[in-house]
Image (cartoon, rainbow, N blue to C red):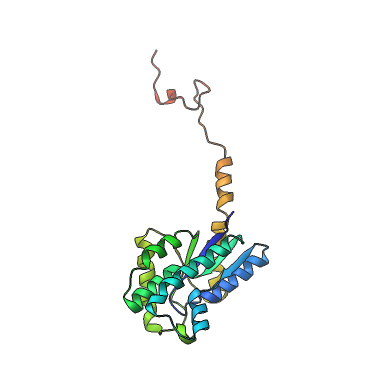
């Protein structure tokens, strides 16, 4: 059975990679088969020593999806350090190209939970991938707009250090508990009211005035 994917989205310098690493560590320590999928864009920049050009955006988005799918076939929980949706967002922001959204949203719809990083962390430089603090709010707005427009939910994760980790874990734990909640709901006895005049719980005689 394919694993459950938790996607971490957010503008630059909002702690996606750090949080993904920490969540993977915590979940693995609990005995869960968790793995982190790295950001395809970061891999590209490290390998090429530059940021991508417009025509390279679609292959990077496809590679991100491929990495996630590969991981979900082998692991129970996948922490994805972004999805193809982030590539689509930056394609719009940098190249004014919105053509990647359609496939990116189809791909993103396969995840089980989306964690959107709050902008409450300070901006820090990080090599080729950082454009500056001025792009964070526009990126955050584009992410929210895309998800809301597609009817795809998300949880905003805020806080510093352990508080941020705990906030994210609460969302993940709710997701992981869903099968148990469904089982409890199915196993719960159905409440029945028994009529004073018979033993039929569906009887409507208690609503009627008996006339003699």
The reply, left or right, for residue 51 in relation to residue 69 is left
Kindly indicate the quadrant of the structure image that contains residue 77: bottom right
The reply, left or right, for residue 141 in relation to residue 64 is left
Q: Residue furthest left?
A: 96
Residue 107 image offset from top left, x and y in percent:
45, 62
Residue 115 image offset from top left, x and y in percent:
48, 66
Q: Is residue 178 above or below residue 24?
A: above
Kindly indicate the quadrant of the structure image that contains residue 102: bottom left
Q: Nearer the viewer, residue 142 or 137?
A: 142
Which residue shows up at 67% across the image and 64% down it?
30
- Quadrant of the frame with the C terminus: top left
Q: Nearer the viewer, residue 24 or 45?
A: 45
Total marks placed: 0
Residue 64 seen in render: yes
Q: Nearer the viewer, residue 178 or 37?
A: 37
Residue 126 image offset from top left, x and y in percent:
49, 85
Which residue shows up at 50% across the image and 30% down it?
193
Residue 153 seen in render: no
Kindly indicate the quadrant of the structure image that contains residue 131: bottom left
């Amino acid at each position: 059975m394919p694993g459950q994917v938790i996607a971490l989205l957010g503008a630059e310098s909002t702690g996606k990679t750090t949080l993904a690493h920490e969540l993977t560590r915590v979940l693995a320590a609990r005995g869960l088969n968790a793995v982190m999928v790295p950001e395809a864009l970061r891999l590209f920049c490290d390998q090429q020593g530059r940021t991508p050009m417009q025509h390279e955006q679609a292959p990077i988005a496809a590679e991100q999806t491929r990495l996630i799918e590969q991981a979900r076939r082998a692991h129970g929980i996948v922490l994805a350090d972004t999805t193809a949706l982030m590539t689509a967002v930056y394609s719009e922001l940098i190249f004014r190209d919105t053509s990647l959204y359609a496939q990116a949203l189809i791909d993103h719809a396969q995840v089980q939970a989306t964690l959107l990083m709050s902008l409450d962390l300070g901006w820090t430089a990080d090599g080729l991938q950082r454009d500056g603090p001025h792009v964070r709010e526009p990126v955050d707005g584009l992410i929210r707009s895309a998800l809301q427009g597609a009817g795809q939910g998300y949880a905003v994760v805020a806080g510093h250090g352990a508080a941020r980790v705990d906030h994210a874990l609460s969302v993940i734990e709710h997701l992981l508990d869903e099968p148990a909640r469904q089982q409890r709901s199915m196993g719960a006895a159905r409440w029945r009211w028994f009529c004073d005049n018979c033993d039929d719980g569906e009887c409507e005689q208690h609503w009627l005035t008996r006339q003699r």
